[in-house]
Every structure is written in structure tokens, then in C-alpha cells.
Image: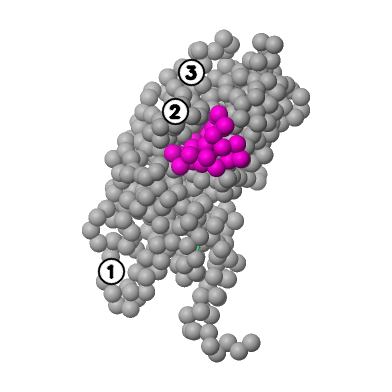
């Protein structure tokens, strides 16, 4: 082939795109890079020279195809973020700077900077952009590192500051006392076992929302009833449970994240168990993919670190961690849990980003919904193509001018675009943050008379009740 006609930029571009695909990190985004304890080797991004060669290659490799922009929920809801523009703006700035242009900060709140803080706050860390990118650009990794820079500069939104403060002072995102964490168990007519006092097969990490939020407490109570019905040995950490840190990490608060992880692992260490079971896909993600990567030794002299950790992890750096849908689906399959097909609702199911796109758990939740007898109709955007509820990356705690909110758009999609149309009665979720976001979107989008939002545990518990009543 005669290649003389190809413009100079084109072969370079073909090379950089190819190189980017070859050097991709399979786990990028799912497992964020750690911040080394040595401040001289920090991973914040104050200056264009702080970007790694791989991140600069990302900028060069972008083909401007716009696929990332077309799937980005932040862009779709009018938040001030377009992932392609961020990548291209960083590249354009580097080229100008290298040609003798002015040095400006990479990120700042107002003033002259390459990227505005509001742009990065808008990111839901849903990873749809990375999944769509044909040349494997790792947006979320560098977007998070820019958020670390924001934390370093104290350029943090007021709501995010409140959440960080709550975590720092009380060990949870609600800012409620630890002693109130197990209050939800008092409404049950049985005692939830204490994993600190007896060996258990399943150490249930309940999480902040199912512990402190009224609506999500119903999800937790239903899961406790399911464990009881299956007769398994399970238990919780009661007031020793602390926030796992997944989302503050994605908001750039790395040191606080490591502190939370350290405390939580310390609490795990005091128990005898086989598998950690998480209610929340966000906890499931970070405990599975990120905790084994934290080099706690590096933080040993940091006064923020409260629990010395030695020899906790298996030789391969792993512990067994599962999302509750996986455990309950296994219990149903083994016959330990009899799920009667007692329900006849027409429903749809929303794949949470951290469970589906992040961790490829697609079938267990669907199997459980179908076992209850419900007629399940798929959302048009499902499985890895799911669309974030708007709560990821700290979105749950922030206020944005959105039109429409991602949660409203998603409920509209459930009522108008599935094969069942407006016959869909229930919008089924498997994530506490999704529950909160969709209950909100149902109200603000005026869908309260049209559809209910339910957790999978609630459907299962209702199905078990149906059996008991029959
Ligand atoms: S992670 Fe999600 S919200 Fe963030 S830029 Fe990518 S697609 Fe948009
Ligand atoms: S999908 Fe990838 S290549 Fe296409 S515009 Fe976005 S970052 Fe660039």
C-alpha cells in the first residue's frame, strides 16, 4: 500500500491508539492506583508533567470518536462534563505549553485552569466511558487523580466536605454514632448473630445505607430474614462496622479511604469467617479489588492509621468476598433456600454499575427475580450497557442542576422503553445507593403513582411470606 498520502498526524495517531490498546490495564478504574505514602511520589495531578506516560498516551490516542460522550450520564443530564473534551483539553494544553505557552494549573475552582473542579465533581465513576472507548483510554483513573488534587488544594464541594467530616469523626457517611449502626436489627423478631462472638460462614458487611437509612433498612431486614430462612451461619459486626470507603476514594480522599479500610480490616480480623458478604456493590468492589492492593505497611508511621495490620491477607492477596445476590442465588441453587414463585408482578431490573460493568455480576440478580415468579422485562440499556443512577463517584451527596436527573431518565425508560411498557409495576434494584437515587427520581420525576422501587431482598422476602401464608 502506498502510504505517502497519509498526513503526518495520522500514522502517529494510529501508532498511539495501538500502543494504548496494548498497554491497557484490565483493572483500571475498578482498582484505582494507590497513593504512595512517600509524598515525593504522589499521584495527584497538579501539573501536566505529573501525568504518567500512560495517561499522556491516553491523550494522544484519542480518536475524537465521541463514544465516551454518548454514553456518559453526566453529559446526558447536563452536568458540566464531557469525557472526550477533558481528554482533548488536556492534550491541547500540553501541546500549547510545550510550544512555549503559559503554565496554568491543571484543575482549580474558577480562575484559569485546564479543567474546572465542577467538571470533575460531575463524574459518577460509572466507567461507561472506558467501556465504550475503542482505544482503551482510562478516563476514570486520571479523573480520580485530578480529584485527589482537588482534595490536596482544599477545592472540595461543601457537601463532599461534610461527608468527609462525617467519616473522619464517626466512621460513617451519615455522621451518626456507631452505637446506632445496628438499631435496624431491633425491629426483627429474631436476633441477628454477632460475628464478633461466634464463628460464621458469612460475615455480612451491612454497609452505611442499609444501617442508617430508613428505606434501605428494609432491604437489610429482608436479607436477615432470608439468611434465617436458609439456616446459614451468618453474623454482622454491630457497632464495630465502619464505612468501607469506596466512594470517598473516587472523590479523591485517598488517605481517609486507607484509614477506613484499615479499621474495617481490623474489625474483620477479630472474627472467624469464610466469606465477606456485602449488601452494597460499592463495598463489594473495593473490598474485592482494592483492599488487597493497599500497602498498609507504607502507612505504618502515619498517625491517622489506627490498626496495625500484619498477615491478614491470603498469600495471593485475596479473601473471599461476594455480593449478597451471589450468595443468595447459590443458597437457592443448593436447595438451602426454597424461593417459591409466589409473585406475579411485571418488573424490570437495573444493573448497578459497581456490580455489573465493574464486576460482571449479571445473572445472579436476574435468576433471583425470576425465581420469585415475577415477569422480568429487560431495560433497553442493560448489563454492561447500563446507565448510572447518578449516585456514583459521590453523586449521591452532591447537588447538581440536572435536566433530567439520571434516575428520572432511567425510570422513564423503564415505563416507556421496555417490551412491557407502562405495565412495569416495579423497578428492581440490587444496590442501596440505587435505592436512594431512584426513590428520589421517582418523586422528583412525578412517577410515584406509576411504579415502585424495590430491592431484590424485598421481593424475595415477600415471596417467602407468600409461601408462609399459603
Ligand atoms: S465515569 Fe461515567 S460519569 Fe464519569 S466521565 Fe465516564 S461515563 Fe461520564
Ligand atoms: S471514546 Fe475514547 S477515543 Fe473516542 S472520543 Fe472518547 S476517549 Fe476519545
Residue 420 is drawn in which quadrant? top right
- Inspect the magenta stretch and tell me whether residue 432 lies in it: yes
Nearest the eye: 212 or 451: 451
If you read the primary sequence from the N terminus, does the residue marked by circle 3 or circle 1 appear first? Answer: 1
Q: Tell me the residue at 50%/13% (across/down).
A: 186
If you read the primary sequence from the N terminus, does the residue marked by circle 2 or circle 3 appear first? Answer: 3
Which-is-in-front pick, marks 1 and 2?
A: 2
* Tag 2 secondary structure: loop
The image's mark for residue 448 is 2
Q: Is 240 drawn above or below residue 60 in the view shown?
A: above
- The residue identified by callout 3 is 184
Q: Tell me the residue at 40%/69% (across/down).
A: 91
Residues in magenta, as a range: 407-434
**Which residue ends up furthest to the right in the rendered image?**
334
* Tag 3 secondary structure: helix
- The residue identified by callout 1 is 103
Q: Tell me the residue at 57%/13% (across/down).
A: 191
Can residue 206 be spotted in the picture?
A: no
Residue 169 is drawn in which quadrant? top left
Mark 2 surroundings within 10 Å by alpha-carbon count, few (fewer than 14), some (14 through 19), many (20 or more): some
Can residue 140 be spotted in the picture?
A: yes
The answer as to whether callout 1 falls within 8 Å of ligand 2 is no
Mark 1 surroundings within 10 Å by alpha-carbon count, few (fewer than 14), some (14 through 19), many (20 or more): some
- Percent position (x, y) of residue 449? 46, 26
Question: Coloured how?
Answer: one colour
- Percent position (x, y) of residue 346? 61, 30
Left or right? Give the position of 289 relative to 62.
Answer: right
Q: Is 229 drawn above or below residue 259 in the view shown?
A: above
* Tag 1 secondary structure: loop
Which-is-in-front pick, marks 3 and 1?
A: 3
Amino acid at each position: 500500500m502506498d502510504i505517502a498520502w497519509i498526513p503526518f498526524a495520522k500514522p502517529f495517531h494510529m501508532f498511539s491508539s495501538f500502543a494504548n490498546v496494548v498497554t491497557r490495564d484490565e483493572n483500571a478504574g475498578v482498582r484505582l492506583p494507590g497513593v504512595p505514602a512517600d509524598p515525593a511520589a504522589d499521584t495527584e495531578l497538579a501539573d501536566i508533567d505529573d501525568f504518567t506516560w500512560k495517561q499522556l498516551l491516553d491523550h494522544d490516542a484519542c480518536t475524537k470518536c465521541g463514544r465516551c460522550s454518548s454514553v456518559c450520564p453526566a453529559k446526558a443530564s447536563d452536568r458540566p462534563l464531557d469525557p472526550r473534551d477533558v481528554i482533548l483539553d488536556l492534550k491541547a494544553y500540553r501541546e500549547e505549553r510545550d510550544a512555549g505557552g503559559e503554565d496554568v494549573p491543571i484543575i482549580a475552582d474558577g480562575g484559569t485552569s485546564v479543567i474546572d473542579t465542577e467538571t470533575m465533581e460531575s463524574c459518577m465513576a460509572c466507567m461507561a466511558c472506558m467501556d465504550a472507548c475503542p482505544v482503551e483510554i482510562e478516563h476514570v483513573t486520571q479523573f480520580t487523580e485530578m480529584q485527589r488534587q482537588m482534595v490536596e488544594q482544599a477545592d472540595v464541594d461543601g457537601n463532599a466536605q461534610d461527608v468527609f467530616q462525617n467519616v473522619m469523626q464517626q466512621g460513617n457517611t451519615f455522621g451518626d454514632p456507631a452505637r446506632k449502626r445496628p438499631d435496624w436489627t431491633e425491629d426483627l423478631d429474631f436476633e441477628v448473630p454477632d460475628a464478633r462472638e461466634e464463628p460464621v460462614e458469612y460475615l455480612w458487611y451491612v454497609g452505611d445505607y442499609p444501617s442508617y437509612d430508613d428505606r434501605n433498612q428494609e432491604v437489610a431486614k429482608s436479607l436477615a430474614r432470608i439468611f434465617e430462612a436458609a439456616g446459614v451461619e451468618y453474623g454482622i459486626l454491630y457497632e464495630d462496622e465502619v464505612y468501607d470507603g469506596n466512594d470517598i476514594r473516587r472523590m479523591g480522599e485517598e488517605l481517609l479511604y486507607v484509614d477506613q479500610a484499615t479499621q474495617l480490616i481490623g474489625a474483620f480480623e477479630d472474627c472467624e469467617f469464610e466469606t465477606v458478604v456485602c449488601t452494597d456493590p460499592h463495598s463489594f468492589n473495593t473490598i474485592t479489588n482494592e483492599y488487597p492492593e493497599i500497602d498498609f505497611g507504607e502507612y505504618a508511621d502515619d498517625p491517622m492509621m489506627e490498626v496495625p495490620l500484619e498477615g491478614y491477607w491470603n498469600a495471593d492477596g485475596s479473601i473471599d468476598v461476594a455480593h449478597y445476590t451471589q450468595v443468595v442465588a447459590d443458597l437457592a441453587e443448593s436447595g438451602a433456600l426454597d424461593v417459591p414463585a409466589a409473585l406475579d408482578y411485571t418488573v424490570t431490573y437495573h444493573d448497578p454499575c459497581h456490580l455489573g460493568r465493574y464486576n460482571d455480576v449479571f445473572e445472579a440478580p436476574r435468576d433471583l427475580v425470576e425465581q420469585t415468579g415475577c415477569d422480568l422485562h429487560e431495560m433497553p440499556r442493560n448489563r454492561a450497557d447500563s446507565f448510572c443512577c447518578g449516585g456514583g463517584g459521590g453523586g449521591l451527596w452532591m447537588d447538581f442542576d440536572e435536566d433530567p436527573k439520571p434516575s428520572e431518565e432511567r425510570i422513564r425508560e423503564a415505563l416507556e422503553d421496555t417490551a412491557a411498557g407502562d405495565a412495569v409495576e416495579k423497578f428492581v434494584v440490587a444496590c442501596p445507593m440505587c435505592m436512594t437515587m431512584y426513590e428520589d427520581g421517582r418523586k422528583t420525576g412525578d412517577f410515584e403513582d406509576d411504579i415502585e422501587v424495590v430491592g431484590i431482598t424485598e421481593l424475595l422476602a415477600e415471596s417467602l411470606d407468600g409461601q408462609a401464608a399459603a
